[in-house]
Image (cartoon, helix red, strand yellow):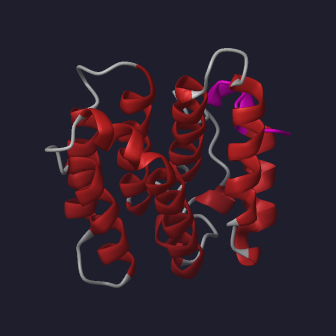
Amino acid sequence: MILPEVRDPRLVTERRGGTLSDEHNHLLALWAAKCAEHVLPLFEAERPDDPRPREALAAVRAWVRGELAMMRTRAAGGQAMGAARDLRGAARFAAYAAGQAAVVAHVPEHDLGAAAYAIKAVVAAAPEGQQEPARLAENRWQRDRLPDAVRDLVLQDQARRNDICWRVFDV
């Protein structure tokens, strides 16, 4: 479970009673897609013929451009997560990261799901004894790509939800 019991209105879109603008929701979605795409090779190495996670990332980018409806984007996210069902380890987490990135179109708070699963994928793929350096490096990589307009919001949310996101964030 990566969603809190009490929602932060800053991460709920204006149309649903929160304060998050469409522009900032799009920035969160694109950042989540970058996080997931960074680890996608871990999935594709195990399932090179399964396009669902990559299609989910294409869907969320199309949604940001206004070319795909939210419901179709959310469905693509579900398909990506379905690709993870019978997998374990890094490949499974990478597919979940892509699925979470796509569903940011529906629930912006899934941005941290994409980031957290990407970190879990990197840690699972790391050689024995290198998991912690891998976790820290992935955190830095992700933070270096955070758009300035949502940086503080994401970092505050990571601190707030780190416990329910497997304590993967460096807070």
**Residue 47 is a magenta residue:** no
Q: Is residue 7 depicted above or below 33 in this figure?
A: above
Q: Residue furthest top?
A: 128
Give the residues in magenta: 161-171
- x, y (%) of residue 18? 60, 64
Q: Is residue 52 depicted above or below 68 in this figure?
A: above
Is residue 100 at least partly visible in the picture?
A: yes
Q: Residue furthest right?
A: 171
Q: Is residue 70 left or right of residue 5?
A: left
Residue ID at (50%, 74%): 26
**Residue 163 is a magenta residue:** yes
Near-viewer residue (18 or 105)? 105
Residue ID at (38%, 53%): 103
Residue ID at (52%, 36%): 117
- x, y (%) of residue 70? 29, 66
- x, y (%) of residue 163? 72, 25
Q: Is residue 75 depicted above or below 63 in this figure?
A: above
Near-viewer residue (165 or 128)? 128
Q: Is residue 24 left or right of residue 94?
A: right
Near-viewer residue (81 or 8)? 81
State the image quarter where residue 17 is shown: bottom right
- x, y (%) of residue 107? 45, 54
Is residue 13 at least partly visible in the picture?
A: no
Q: Is residue 149 left or right of residue 48?
A: right
